[in-house]
Image (spheres, rainbow, N blue to C red):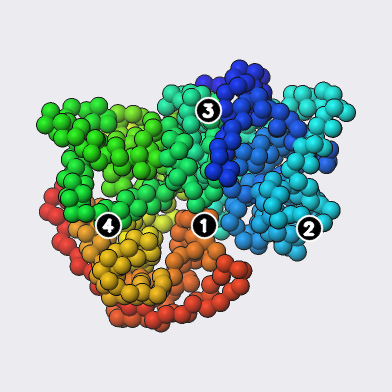
Amino acid sequence: MQTFEASTQTFPRRLLEHGRVRPNRPAFREKHLGIWQSWSWAEVNGEVRALACGLAALGFGRGMHLAIVGDNRPRLYWAMLAAQCLGGVPVPLYQDAPAADMAYVLENAEVAYAIVEDQEQVDKLQEVKALYPKIRRIAYDDERGMRHYRQPELISFAQLQQLGRDYDRAHPGFFEAAVAAGSGADCAIILYTSGTTGKPKGVCQSHAALLAAGQGGVAFDRLGADEDILSYLPMAWVGDCLFSLAQALVAGFTVNCPESGDTVQIDMREIGPTYYFAPPRVFENMLTSVMIRMEDAGALKRRMFGHFMAVARRCGADILDGKPVPAADRLAYGLGKLLVYGPLKNVLGLSRVRVAYTAGAAIGPDLFRFYRSIGVNLKQLYGSTETCAYVCLQPDGNIKFDSVGLPAPGVEVRLADNGEVLVKSAATMSGYYKRPDATAEAIDADGYFHTGDAGLFDAEGHLKIIDRAADVGRMNDGAIFAPNYIENKLKFFPYIKEAVSFGHARDQVCAFINIDIEAVGNWAERRGIAYAGYTDLAAHAQTYELVRDCIERVNLELAGEALMAGTQIHRFLILHKELDPDDDELTRTRKVRRAFIAEKYAPLIDALYQGRQSQYIAIQVKFEDGRSGTSCADLRICDSKTFPAVANAAA
């Protein structure tokens, strides 16, 4: 892996270098009140300098931690860089986390300073003070609603920068000396894990590690300063840190922040990113919106869409990979590009995308194939918070739908005796904050990080991730049970938003289903089915038939797979509520917390395996206003058809 010159081995030094090399190129854009605002690299240098000096004037210094809370905003990225300029460490928090979750991270990271987006986050931190009273100063970006706030610890972003300009004039050379004192080995950021199996842990990543991951990805996909990306994923997630911070500071491309979460799709079409990153859930939602549109379209459009999508499935991915395709198929695909694929990519905002990545969870092969078949160069990225999301990459022209690619440049990947994926690279974390025990458990004496994922290499060296090692189990008949593999197949259908399967140490597989209220609601309205809300629609007999059809189609696929034929779903139910991070059923990155769900919904699991036709359940839930309550329902349980294993599946 290429390394940086010592003079640019930190984020602040990379920032200063871009200000020198490309001062007038756009570094950040943000849509505000419907208008795109732009800042050049020279302007960003000035903004960060003022902010860093302002923090210094408030007493923030080397080794201290700065909480960052809010949606993706240029000023919050600048706050990260400002903290790093002083030798401090930014600690981004999930903006939708409840106060109690925030309090845990703030206390664990020993945070005394915070920069937040708006009144909502100020209010949340004020609430957190009852649990963690050690926050000394809070700066806020958006001043709307803050006029009557008189708490002495509050300061506006504009005031903080003015304070910094005054401090800078009074202390000439201070900023340059602070930046010069930093080194690549310094901690650049603390990112907290999603806490799938326990309390989140703070992952300490150095400047050198993040920049190594950024440099590796930029070189691998030949990214340059002309790229445009849309930054909309949580700033507390390692994926956003890699793409919107590390790679941006390596390549010098433009980071675009949408106006709000509700306008992402519109803003994406306006920007037309050339480089795009999203977890599988976003691509699933895009596909769901497409299918809903097509169901509402006229008969002619539906037939045309179906015909050309069949062409795309047959040859689209091969054309994208530059493989030989019969002339007739190539001609049909060209016509489909004009009539269907091009307009479809334009609607999705993917027209200019040269490289797209997905990561954070396994993506179903069918979903993967759909995007590549219409000409979107979608690839999988495999990594974790502890490895700067940099372990495996898929090279152009060598994409396999069931793998996560080859080890990235500079990364060593091997498998333990139990199949666990082990990783060693310059992008590996320094350690877990205040958790030497957990660090020693995760990184062995040879320097390999134990990912917790179960995988295998194919004949060409591509890595296939089966599931989380802790989640992979065995059926009573000895068949491998990989729940995530089954769930991803189910979630390919637009009507299924989430699924949780059970089968370890059981005779058969059963599943919980969450319907997608938008897709199923649209389906119901076109059939004249009345419903009052999610719970009512989820319990409807025709909804059960719709979901049963999806499950049986997945079972038919599984019947043709050697390892998975015995894991077809025999029984299922549709939950009366959506699984929710606020109810601790999902992590903030929307990963299923299996152990928690198994305990919380134990009566439903027992009913599935005891052959009951229905089961009453009463559970505690949290409402949006913070109150708790009880959600009750009598849930119907249905059987689904299974299929004999295909004879050659065992070959």
Residue at coordinates 40% horizontally, 75% vertically from top-left? Answer: 532
Q: 51 or 522, which is in the foreground? A: 522
Q: Report the Cα–Cα distance between label 4 and label 3.
A: 39 Å
Observer-side mark, 4 or 3, equals 4
List x then y, in percent, for residue 17: 64, 21
**Amino acid residing under circle 4:** Asp
> Neighbour class for label 4 at 10 Å: few (<14), some, many (≥20)?
few
Q: Does any portion of residue 424 appear in the rendered image?
A: no
The residue indicated by pointer 4 is 296
Q: Does any portion of residue 139 appear in the rendered image?
A: yes
Observer-side mark, 1 or 2, equals 2
List x then y, in percent, for residue 386: 55, 42
Q: 79 or 593, which is in the foreground? A: 79
Q: Are marks 3 and 2 in contact (CB under 8 Å)?
A: no
Q: Quadrant of residue 392?
A: top left
Residue at coordinates 53% horizontally, 72% vertically from top-left? Answer: 621
> Neighbour class for label 3 at 10 Å: few (<14), some, many (≥20)?
many
Instruction: Choose the circle earlier in sequence order: 1 or 3.
Output: 3
Q: Report the Cα–Cα distance between label 1 and label 4.
A: 34 Å
The residue indicated by pointer 3 is 253
> Neighbour class for label 1 at 10 Å: few (<14), some, many (≥20)?
some
**Amino acid residing under circle 2:** His
